[in-house]
Image (tube, grey):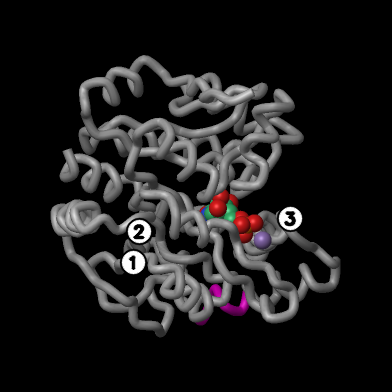
Amino acid sequence: MTGSITIETTGEVAAALGEGRPVVALESTIITHGMPWPGNRDMALEVEAAIRSEGAVPATIAVIDGRLHAGLDEASITALAQAKDVMKLSRADLAFAISEGRTGATTVAATMMAAHLAGISVFATGGIGGVHRGAETSFDISADLDELARTPVIVVSAGAKAILDIPKTLEALETRGVPVVAFGQDEMPAFWSRNSGLRAPLRLDDAGAIARFETTRRALGVHGGMLIANPVPEDEEIPAAEINRHIEAALEAARARGVEGKAVTPFLLSEILKLTDGASLKTNIALVLNNARLAARIAVALT
Ligand code: PSU
Ligand code: MN
């Protein structure tokens, strides 16, 4: 049997897509696996409000009881933020959750797939998955990187999470032909902090320039997505030297407990939350909000 999947949208999302108005996709793994309740629900709702206040429509992506949604109402977001046993879905298992009637949160990779299917070309998140430290032995490289190479969606992030190997992540993106654009600075940001010590491959300073780059890529027939690396606001960052100590401790805890596979990223994020006494969560929320605002401005500039 072949056919197409019905995407459930809210009236707000359906109307915007139908009229060609700007829409910004949002992922849900950050809600279910990235932050604890109730901060996760507050973050999800604040991010939606930030997108609306910039003149775009938010579409949070998730699979609920086997149905793929692009746009969730407040009650559904609240339910998802408290739900137990939610799958973490990437390219490998998005269809599995649908065929088995399961509930799953979408990672960057699965959110890009769903956004593209729904006709949404801009997506805001916190940090993408990438090449993990020690990947030369663990082979742990996020499917987010291959998705960026193949699916035409602009992903607005605060860079790759600093728990990763950022130089190797940049190399892997370069190999795959994914443009990485730092926003408003020369340096690649590192999620909780504005600095990584690495120069970003490209730099642009306003949403209009990003939209022009995207339309030029399309005109050239270049396939695939692009990554915008938007530094966290200065007054909300955790300086690199400070967060790096906690990252080292969290990585050590993960090794000691033998945490593997899909569990690695959620485990590290929750360890760092404990080690920083909640400061990492405050910064995480601030950077997602900052990315949502920029994504909305890019979506507006594209229409
Ligand atoms: N950024 C966050 N919190 C998260 C993630 C990113 O601030 O929870 C999620 C994203 O959904 C990303 C995923 O796609 O982590 C990467 O997981 P993995 O390394 O297992 O591919
Ligand atoms: Mn992995």
Residue 179 makes an appearance in the image = yes
Is there CB contact under 8 Å for labels 1 and 2? yes
Q: Nearer the viewer, residue 242 or 63?
A: 63
Q: Nearer the viewer, residue 152 or 49?
A: 152
Helix, strand or loop at label 3? It is helix
Q: CA distance from mark 3 to mark 2?
A: 26 Å
Is there CB contact under 8 Å for labels 3 and 1? no
Q: CA distance from mark 1 to mark 2?
A: 5 Å
> Can you tell me whether the CB of the residue at mark 2 lies under 8 Å from the nearest atom of ligand 1?
no
The residue shown at (69%, 30%) is: 83
- Disc on the earlier residue, 1 or 2: 1
Answer with the quarter of the image where residue 247 lies.
bottom right
**Which-is-in-front pick, marks 3 and 2?**
2
Which amino acid does the dot numbered 3 rest on? Ala
**Which-is-in-front pick, marks 3 and 1?**
1
- Disc on the earlier residue, 3 or 1: 1
Which amino acid does the dot numbered 2 rest on? Met
- What x and y, as percent, mark residue 144? 53, 57
> Can you tell me whether the CB of the residue at mark 1 lies under 8 Å from the nearest atom of ligand 1?
no
Q: Which residue is mark 3?
A: 263
Q: Which residue is mark 2?
A: 226
Q: CA distance from mark 3 to mark 1?
A: 28 Å
Which amino acid does the dot numbered 1 rest on? Pro
